[in-house]
Amino acid sequence: MKIFIIGYMHPKLDKRVSRTVSSLSKSHEIIYQYWTDKEEKKYQDGNITYIPIKYTKGTKGNPFKKLINRRTLDKIICDLVENEDYDILYMHHFLASRPLEPFKIAKKRNKKIVYDIHEYHPENFLAELPAIIGDLKTAVLWHLFKKQLKLSDLAIFVSGETLNDVIDKVGITKDKTFIMPNYANFILKPDIQKKQKEIVLVGKVTRKIEDEKKLLNILINKGFSFKVIGMDSQEFDDIPHASTSFLPYNEMMEELSKAAFSLISYNTVKDRHYKNDIFALPHKYYDSIAAGTPVIVKESFISMAKQVEELGIGLVINPSNIEQSVEKIQKAYENYETILKNIEKYQKYFVWSQEKEQEFLKIIEL
């Protein structure tokens, strides 16, 4: 069987996308389109045909101008969907200026369509738009999202909460869906001896932590330190901290493993009820547990908060309630050894494994 994987604007080594390429290539021929900002040519390695498409990100102008500038890129990908030989079309995003076209082309060609939904698309796409225009955009995207899902043979979600929320609105049946969180690559056993009294924020995309800065400043005065792993941003200039630039995955995990806590409390956009945050199970969450580091999770992040409380692998806070949050973190540090034992007990559920890969392959091949 031949599978055409559309990475769209994801780089070649994007963790989630490249995992599907690696897993599916073990038993199938793969055509893999990915984004690059360099001059690269199509090439083949084993049973994977790589199709890099160059596009310059960071186009200046409003979001609609950026959308218009995607048209040439999207046309190239649609032509590939129309002309390449494949049995399954695996979409890791939709094309910004042609959101339905690849789905329609593949359906017309009687190909199976797999839609891997990394984010809560109706809210995530053009998230920076102002409120009134943003509400209109979300309504339009929901209309398109429903059509995309109905054209798909299988929809893959990152969390059960996202899946259930979408099912309530769209009405697709669960037999057409699969949940695949952003699993970590490997486990680092918790080692209390190498732990520093440090709270880290990890990720290559800058997150806003206005609500958390007062909390962190108090904790710094109580002997904690704060480190930002993977980004060097002016966003953190008003708080004492250390930082690293973007690190290769293994180095990032090693750095993360030394921290006492991983902070997963932030705002991606102004809306504190942004579903792409509250229903997410992001890489930084799975990587933190796999690295043996307890997490501090914002209580509105429903998917993560539920797991953290059930498994005892960290603590849940309301960052706007500073006094209570400081007390919770200090108490967790006093009971730190118990939390580490829980993490070691449950780490295997947060890491990609042969069993999870076989389950994934089985659902794709049905």
Image (spheres, helix red, strand yellow):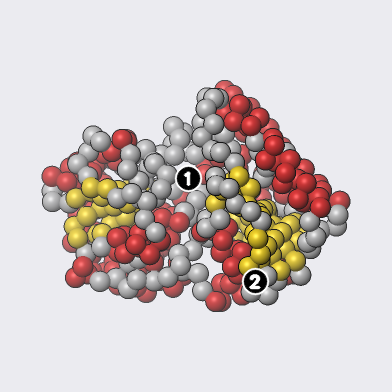
* Amino acid under disc 2: Gly
Mark 1 to mark 2 CA distance (whole Å): 38 Å
Residue 287: image quadrant is: bottom left
Farthest residue, direction top = 132
Please give the name of the residue rendered at 22% of the width and 45% of the height, measured from the top-left corner.
241
Mark 1 / mark 2, whichever is N-terminal: 2
Quadrant in which the N terminus is drawn: bottom right
Q: Is 288 situated above or below 100?
A: below
In this view, the mark in front (1 or 2) = 2
Using residue 303 as the reference point, say whether residue 100 is left or right of it.
right
- Front residue of 128/308: it is 128
Circles 1 and 2: CB distance less than 8 Å?
Answer: no
Q: Is 366 situated above or below 152?
A: below
Residue 364: image quadrant is: bottom right
Residue 277 tag number: 1
Please give the name of the residue rendered at 60% of the width and 52% of the height, measured from the top-left corner.
40
Label 1 crowd (10 A; few <14 / some 14-19 / many >=20): many
Q: How many marks?
A: 2
Q: Position of residue 171 (x, y in %)?
A: 72, 49
Residue 46 tag number: 2
Label 2 crowd (10 A; few <14 / some 14-19 / many >=20): few
* Amino acid under disc 1: Asp
Using residue 158 as the reference point, say whether residue 330 is left or right of it.
left
Dot 1 lies on which element? helix
